[in-house]
Amino acid sequence: MTTILIVDDSRLARNMVASVITSLRPDWTIVAAASGDEALDVIGETVPVAAIVDYNMPGMDGLTLCERLKERFLGLHIGLLTANVQDSLKMKAEALGVRFIAKPITSDKIREFLAAGGQ
């Protein structure tokens, strides 16, 4: 079973990303969460092949979640999805080995993210 984690406090954004992934990889299992803490709970012992994480969320921000996911799943391919396109945020994401995905969400951006991870 190939699993991808989607984390965004916006239900609409989660659904949009899930819809694109389902169209590109219909055999994948999608695990979705509305916050960083929920994501760490719902992923459980499942090892995802990739994660797409929103930056601005209540509680734990996306970069902190990325750090936690990288610690838990070595080599995990993560995309930080955000409308915040500041250079400082891009540099922090790159320093963590996280791919920056600027909103708005498009099929092309999700396809490029998946292709970059070898999926």
Image (tube, rainbow, N blue to C red):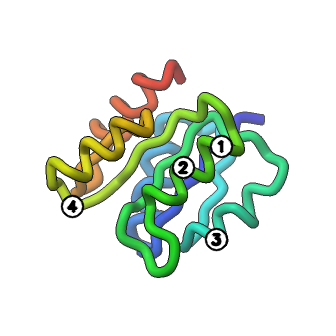
In front of the other: label 2 or label 4? 2
| Crowd band around label 2 with a 10 angstrom C-alpha radius: few (<14), some (14–19), many (20+) | some
Picture mark count: 4
Question: Which numbered dot is residue 84?
Answer: 4
Which residue does the numbered mark 2 point to in the structure image? Answer: 67
Which residue does the numbered mark 1 point to in the structure image? Answer: 71
- From the viewer's side, name the closer residue of 45 and 94: 94
Left or right, residue 56 beside residue 47: left
Q: Amino acid at mark 2?
A: Glu
N-terminal-most mark, 3 or 4: 3
Q: Amino acid at mark 1?
A: Glu
Left or right, residue 41 beside residue 108: right
N-terminal-most mark, 1 or 4: 1
x, y percent for residue 57: 42, 74
Which residue does the numbered mark 3 point to in the structure image? Answer: 37
Name the image quarter holding residue 42: bottom right
- Mark 2 vs mark 4, CA separation in Å: 18 Å
